[in-house]
Image: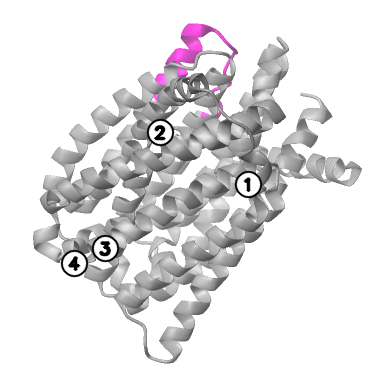
Amino acid sequence: MNNKILKNILKGTLAITSGTVVTMAFHFLSIFFLARHLSQTEFGLYALIFSISNLLNLLSNLGLEISIVKNIVEGSQQRDSVLRPTLIIKSSFTVFILILYLFFYNFYPTAGNDGLWKYNVYIIILFLLGSFRDLFYRIIQGLNKFKQYSLIQISTAVLRVALIILSIEFEKFNFILLLYFEIIIIILALLLQFINIPFGSLLKGKVPLSDYVKLIKFSSPLYANNLITFTYDRVGVFIIGLLMTASSVAIYDVSTKIPSALQGILGSYILVFFPNISTLFGQGDNNSAEKLINKSIFHISFLLSSLTVIMSIWNVEIVTLFFSSKYIDSAFPLIIMMFSLLLRNLANILGYAIVAAGYSKIPLKVNLLSVIIGIASSLVFIMYWNYIGAAFAVLIMNFITLFQYVYYHRKLNLIKLNYSFSYNLMVAFLLAFLVSIVSFDHLVMKILLLIFYMSINYRYVIEFRNLFTQLKIIKSSI
């Protein structure tokens, strides 16, 4: 794997990750305050309101957000012919989804138990504003305005924390006021996006009907995969909401916060990995592609295995620090969700590699089977083990996904996979299992256990250090 590829990956990852990390930090700071000033029922309702608005947002996007990025980066001709039909199709389908929601929302099972219906107006406003905010983020991304993209994210994250702190300081904080804050934050994002998007140049000229048809045809498969992916991500919350109380939703949702934040950061790498692996396969350089895939899997598996072990040893302390002691029940499912994160990111590398090689239908098949198994296991496990069952169901989904991608790689004979990552998985699993059945309450014992883990992975630590040395050399040459 040559230095040019490493430079591209480093530059792209640094640009995208910087804004993500800062935004995540402020997001966790806001969660820190919310967990201490909202009841479990309110926190659960907060999670459900955003789950519903995000679902409505997904249903209304028709895969257009990815399509518009592709068309904008391809040149001025595609750029001029894509924004108008995108906005018209998006607006029309958003109205259609809103009408469907207004017809069916009374049948949502949690409404009768926890009063979710009282917040229906807020759900609708968050959906409408958030839907176009996400689309405009994609336009900014397609225009390569990554600095502006990050600044808007950071600005809104800082404003959220500032509003929450001020309302707490003046003893005005409550659940309804929090929802108003979220609406104000999205409006600010939209205003900043309008400033940075040249709508005048992007909307010029007439667009023939054939371009509308072409856009819908291209976006439809992406839309189907988005639906599968969303189901894959949020099935646990919806089934818990269906079968359990809002408090159970809150405990489960807290256990997903740290893995979700890490997923957001690791997603920055995927955004850079995919175009580079596509270039290598497109050039027929399978040897370099094989090295990039195996190195990515190796380093991600070691990094996330190490984080999982740390979370397993200090899970109670971490939950108490970030979310308060009333969410102590989230400590054990947090360990399970960290293993799920590990498996998911390994699967993401293999999945994007398959798409880059030209097999675009395989991820849809893989995700469809995984979700079916995940939903079935969720319905059974949640009935017996509540939110812990939901966490195990997600773990099973991610294991099935990884297993399928390994199978397809062997079947297609794209590259020769290095299975050394399985060693990291096994060691992390055994240590997490040991911590779960044996009490390591003393700080010295916990530190010794972490030292033991690093010592048996010494050669991986050395290789990881060599990677940072190599990246420092490349960075200094940029």
- How far is mark 2 from mark 1, CA to CA? 21 Å
Mark identifier at residue 62? 2
- How far is mark 4 from mark 3, CA to CA? 8 Å
Rendered residue at 17%/42% (across/down): 381
Q: Say if the magenta span includes residue 406.
A: yes
- How far is mark 4 from mark 2, CA to CA? 29 Å
Magenta stretch bounds: 403-421
Q: Amino acid at mark 2?
A: Leu
Query: Helix or strand or loop: what does disc 4 sit on?
Result: helix
Q: Look at discs 3 and 1 and give the one toward the viewer.
A: 1
Mark identifier at residue 121? 3
Circle 1: is it few (<14), some (14-19), or many (20+) Cα within 10 Å? few
Mark sitting earlier along the chain (3/2): 2
Q: Amino acid at mark 4?
A: Lys
Mark sitting earlier along the chain (4/2): 2
Rendered residue at 57%/18% (across/down): 417
Residue hosting label 4? 118
